[in-house]
Image (cartoon, rainbow, N blue to C red):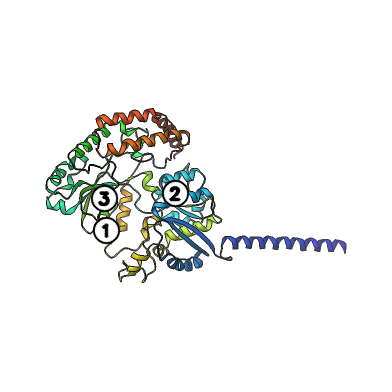
Amino acid sequence: MKKKLGLLLALVLSIGTILSACSSKETSTSDKGGKNGEPYEIKWYTIGTPQKDTDKVFAEVNKYLKKEINATVKMTQIDWGDWEQKSQVMINSGEPFDIIFTNGKDYIQNTQKGAFLALDEMLNNEGKELKEVINPDFLEGIKVDGKIYGVPTNKEVARQTVYTFNKRLVDKYNFDISNVKTLEDLEPMLKVIKEKESGITPIATFKAFLRYDYVFNAEMPFAFPFEGDTNQVINPFETDEAMQTLKTMHKYYKAGYLKEDAATSKDSWPMDVENWFVRMGGSQPYADLLWSRSAKYDVVSVPAEQPTVVNDSVSGSIQAISASSKNPEKAMEFLTLLNTDPYLRNLVDKGIENVHYKKNEDGTIEDLPARINGYNMPSYSLGNHFILNLYKDDPKDKWEKFEEFNVSAVKAPSLGFNFNSDPVRSELASITNISKEFYPALATGSVDPEEYLPKFNEKLKEAGVDKVLKEMQKQHDEWKSKQK
């Protein structure tokens, strides 16, 4: 009898342990959000001016998410001017949240600090469908130490710098812009505009374009060439090309083709003010149509380079999952749905149908006043572009052209290489200050490069540019040796 009672007691205790474990598991599931638990609230911070109708739109978003993944989203936008400081304070404070917009050097630096989670495993599980729709060049280009730490926006994958012209003036003087291949090719047109169009500045201030694969940006003296030894990092300001280009810019400056305060002006040259003839900038398929729509007059562009996949072009818009997230798997489920589900993607981007926009019989859309005044979101920052509805006046083949553009792009030599600046942090701080002092004046032609470019390079050497180049080359060679 004692033996039987002992066995019975052991069985009861065993069952109790199992029930306790199940109860604990259910509590955990409930906390995290799952099919059998309460919806998990995903905290999402992103860039842009806070919108009046965000709560209204996300009430609809959350109805859908509860049904699809048993979650809700609390989206908080931080305004453009406050973004850099406020987002960094939030990351550094260790505040628990799930998803945050990031890009460029902020993505790299915060990843290296451990602020973001590596997503490789989740992209093979919760994010499998997401991984299948993203251009692989994006995922390759945002790797840090061989791992993926964010979900890039699936859009144009390449950088293509273009010369953009005021079409009215091109037509008026019968200019043949198809012959424009270099900075020097602009000269005959600039001369005519200067002489005959008193209210027009020939060049809406742009900085000299040197086509390199930059490690940081065009201001800093670190880049890989696209021709020759593409695995050798150099200071591009020491090249003959730099001297020639800067001399041309100085010639144009002296001729009055740029404003006198070009080096220091904060004027952003908004396109809707028709006071310019030519400008430079990054492009994408059908960009001229978008710019013309915004400007309310026609513009036309010609390429200054072929489409090229560089680190900057793939890291311009990323959603990272925070290391402080209490449920990163649920955050990945949301990002997967956002990037693969056309209903959710358009709801988050455009708002509520028949409130913020209307859909036409052919499936295209038109904005309603409520969207313009209450829910005008920065589309590039939110997710996959290829499942967005087309506007009524969009070309029917818009997304096909984006695909063709991406396929045509060439990959930069250092795509996926991300420099760890810790070993040369003090040198880089000095070099950054020197670049800020010299680059704007040189790149706008405001000073004579034959005098100031040697001074710039001398100052860079004194600040330790060669040490940084050596460290950069060492890290690049180590990275390259690990590539398949």
Q: CA distance from mark 3 to mark 1?
A: 13 Å
* Front in this rendered view, residue 405 or 458: 458
The x and y percentages for residue 177 are 17, 47
**Which type of secondary structure does the marked residue at label 2 adopt?**
helix
Residue 23, placed above or below residue 228? below
- Identify the disc placed on residue 269: 3
Question: Mark 1 is on which residue type?
Answer: Ser
* Front in this rendered view, residue 412 or 7: 412
- What residue does disc 2 label? 85
Mark 2: give few (<14), some (14-19) or many (20+) Cα within 10 Å: few
Residue 379, placed above or below residue 278? below
Q: Quadrant of residue 472?
A: top left
Is residue 119 visible to us here? no
Q: CA distance from mark 1 to mark 2?
A: 30 Å
Residue at image position (28%, 38%) is 441
Q: Earlier in the sequence, mark 1 or mark 2?
A: 2
Q: Earlier in the sequence, mark 3 or mark 1?
A: 3
Q: Are marks 2 and 3 in contact (CB under 8 Å)?
A: no
The x and y percentages for residue 227 are 30, 35
**Which type of secondary structure does the marked residue at label 1 adopt?**
helix
- Identify the disc placed on residue 294: 1
Question: Mark 2 is on which residue type?
Answer: Gln
**Which type of secondary structure does the marked residue at label 3 adopt?**
loop
Mark 3: give few (<14), some (14-19) or many (20+) Cα within 10 Å: some
- Give the number of the mark in front: 3 or 1: 3
* Front in this rendered view, residue 286 or 130: 286
Q: Quadrant of residue 327?
A: bottom right
Question: Mark 3 is on which residue type?
Answer: Trp
Residue at image position (51%, 47%) is 92
Q: CA distance from mark 2 to mark 3?
A: 25 Å
Extreme-right residue of the structure: 1
- The reply, left or right, for residue 459 in relation to residue 450 is right
